[in-house]
Amino acid sequence: MRNFKKCFWCLVGPTVLLLAYAPAIRKLFIRWNSGDNSYCYLIPPLFFYLCWEKRKTFDFGLLSGSYEGIALIVLAIGISFLGELSSLETLLYFGFWLSIVALGLILYGRRLRELAFPFLILLFMIPLPPFINRLLTFRLQILTSALAVSLMRLSGLSVFREGNIIDLGVAQLQVVEACSGLRYFMPLVLLALLMDYYVLRRWWSRALLLALVPLVSVVANAFRIFLLGLLYFKGLREWAEGFSHYFAGWLVFVLAGGLLFLVAVLLRQFEGRIVKEESVVKPKKMTSPPKSFPVLVSLFSLIVVAGGVGFRFFPKTFIVPTKASLAVFPMEIDGWQGERLKLSSRTLKSLWADDYVYSVYRREGFPGIIYLLIPYYSYQTTRHTAHAPQSCLLGSGWAILKSGDWKLKVSPARVIPIRYMWLEKRGQRLLAAYFFLQRGRVITSPWWHKFYLFWDAITRRRTDGALVRIEMLLASEIAPREAEREFKKFLVYLWPELVKFIPD
């Protein structure tokens, strides 16, 4: 009977936690399904294996709960709530991870420190934040392309590179996001940590192995692109595409992992002889958990249930203001004649918008065109929110030449901030600008945008808003000053139309 009660109270916490975080877990699986994060599926089995490996030194049957777990679960739920309302997915998932740690404290108290490494590995279930992912991807694309071209030239091949495009003469290679090397980076970091744990003992050797991961990741991927370039030059196009292309990716990853292991073995030789103590600990046996254990688990479960109810039902209380449809947004602004465009279903799916206008404006006699995109959101939470366009522009190959903020007077009583960027790609110039128009506020900082989402969700029960994105594609003959003057003038005349369609 005692064993039954013990098992019952041990199962209550995990069951309640999984049910409460079910919506967050579904969103986490969506992130895992992307190519860059597919390694995350290995993390839970790896976590359980590392815990199972500790069975000789850690008595999982000995329950020694701690009220510190209650404090931590309150913090974890708060962080998850902050992440959900401010549309910061990483905070939502970090709160979930903290909740698992809190459950461990409820079950095992401070003995949980002995499982520090498995819980560190479990942290890898959280994908990189999207904006970091995009920015790293672009930088790795350029770095990998440059290194691959250098290898080709060293081998006597004549190639030309522009951005992430490699011109081989017989073909063109584009180092797309999937080939940037980021897909190698996080799995190799994970491998390096496991090698640190199993092979190395000194802090300096562990740190050195981790520091080598970015270099190995970039070099390995550049070597893969170099091999593909050789195949094109040899006329073996069919070997460079399709299954062979993806198989080469896996093969190079295995070689990169093997190289890291070789480095780890060499570093182990420099560490000298170190005796690792792995004595089996025999804790005092307890026939039943502490008397306070059911109280701890019950309190933990109540807090988690309250958090789960909040995750599901609080966003449903948001006020959704009525507004005019952007489908009738004017196509004539200060002499600029517009043409309504449609976004692809794939773009719409990634945009998450409830309403949008996408149009191109031209003016007779002006050697440039303006693209206007305004996605509107009736509410905003994780995976349903506006995001700044820098990473999208960088991901499509544009390089930022200059950026800053304008203070633009759009009416006698209103001056608004606007974030602008001068960009260049293959000789083309683009003047881009954006701002968040959110519940009467004009914001250019993505971080302030997140803060006010959370603040207004709590104080006003509103998270609606829009992103206003304007881009002017310029002809070569137009001077930057003239372009900026016309651009700002367009924005001034655009403003009165915006406030008619975006609720204050």
Image (tube, rainbow, N blue to C red):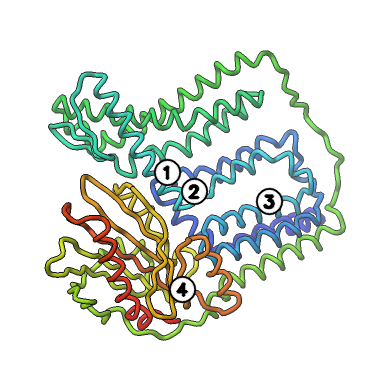
Name the one closer to the observer, 165 or 286.
Answer: 165
**Residue 346 location (% of width, % of height):** 29, 61
Q: Is residue 470 left or right of residue 122?
A: left
Closer to the chain start, of discs 3 and 2, is 3
Q: Nearer the viewer, mark 1 or mark 4?
A: 4
- Return the residue at label 3: 101
Closer to the chain start, of discs 2 and 1, is 2
**For the residues bearing labels 2 and 1, Cβ distance under 8 angstroms:** yes
Closer to the chain start, of discs 4 and 3, is 3
Q: Nearer the viewer, mark 3 or mark 2?
A: 2
Q: Nearer the viewer, mark 2 or mark 1?
A: 1
Residue 128, disc: 2
User: Disc 1 on helix, strand or loop?
Assistant: helix
Residue type indicated by callout 1? Leu
Residue at image coords 78%, 43%: 111
Labels in figure, total: 4
Q: Quadrant of residue 301?
A: bottom right
Residue type indicated by callout 2? Leu
**Residue 208 location (% of width, % of height):** 56, 26
The span from disc 2 to disc 1 (Cα, nearest Å) is 10 Å
Residue type indicated by callout 3? Val
